[in-house]
Image (cartoon, rainbow, N blue to C red):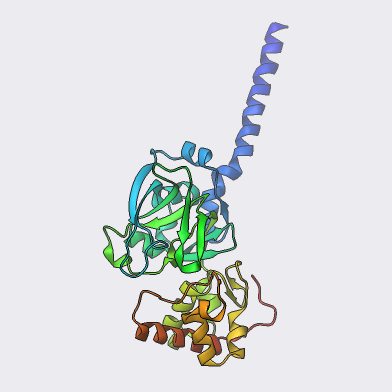
Amino acid sequence: MVQTLTAVIRANCVLAGWRLFFLALPMLAGPASAVAQGGNAVIMPDLGALQSRMAVRPDTFTVIEPHLSLNEQQTKIDYVGYPAARVFDVLLGPGWKEIEADIEFRALDGYVSRIEIARFRQYPAYLVFAIKGQTAFTVDNLRQNQKNVPLGPYYLIWDNLHSPELIGQEAADWPYQISQIAISTARKEALLPGGLARQYVEHAGLAQKHCLTCHRVNGYGGDKWPIDLAVRAKAMKEDAFLQWVLNPSAQKPGTTMPPLLVSHPDSERHAAARKIYRYFLALPAQKNPKR
């Protein structure tokens, strides 16, 4: 009787173990699937869950904060977090760095930033969750007329102290309120259909970086202000479009839309705005685009 009971208990324990194993399979396969299929969104874990999965302690990283730095003013902030590459290893799987695609960052407010994986191979980036010595995890976004903007749950920053060429660049590649990440291969197909690639590669890159984090073309882009610019630009004269993108506050006081390339010389700003406008004119507008 005792032997029979012992056998039953052992069998149930084995069965329970296999049940736990199969229940764990989706979690184990998650990162690999996100890389292999190139589009499965990974919901960012809460801070406690992320810390338990990381093999290193969080560290402090000092950067020049682009949202606070205008003209010659440079404001340094000490952030607390992890090297982005190590976080991606955990959440996306170790093969993410070898893929020629983008990492898509979706924010709580609908902002979407897509950054080429090649950029992460070139420059150190960090995924942070706090400001050292402060309770509030917020920033004043001076270019968008916003104060005390929440940065959490996670904020992507770049080491622009050791790579000073990054200092004068815009903040489009510094997404905050990150709630999901994914490997994305949708950029070229959506932005350069047909024969546009021959002439409009630079134009599409400018539009993707400076416009399509908040807006869209043919279903591709952000959800913050999902206006289809492939349609809207065709209804505007070039001068009106340039006025909007170069000085949006003058067109609509209090708008959160940042001016295009505000830290660059006027000649560069106007040239970039014209390229973006001509690209939107050339881009075919779809009636029922897929997201």
Front residue of 14 and 135: 135
Percent x, y of residue 93: 47, 50
Point out the residue furthest to the right here. 1
Point out the residue furthest to the top here. 1
Does residue 6 appear to the left or right of 33 in the view shown? Answer: right
Task: Report if residue 195 is visible in the image.
Answer: no
Front residue of 94 and 147: 147
Percent x, y of residue 239: 51, 91
User: Which residue lies at the image location 27% right of the left edge and 64% below the top edge?
Assistant: 164
Please tell me in which quadrant of the rendered image residue 253 appears: bottom right
User: Which residue lies at the image location 43% right of the left edge and 54% below the top edge?
Assistant: 95
User: Which residue lies at the image location 57% right of the left edge and 78% below the top edge?
Assistant: 252
Please tell me in which quadrant of the rendered image residue 115 appears: bottom left
Assign the C terminus to one quadrant of the image: bottom right
Does residue 84 appear to the left or right of 285 in the view shown? Answer: left
Q: Where 255 falls versus 247 (above or below)?
A: above
Please tell me in which quadrant of the rendered image residue 156 appears: bottom left
Q: Where 245 falls versus 121 (above or below)?
A: below
Does residue 106 appear to the left or right of 65 in the view shown? Answer: right
Task: Report if residue 138 is visible in the image.
Answer: yes
Percent x, y of residue 39: 56, 61
Does residue 9 appear to the left or right of 152 in the view shown? Answer: right
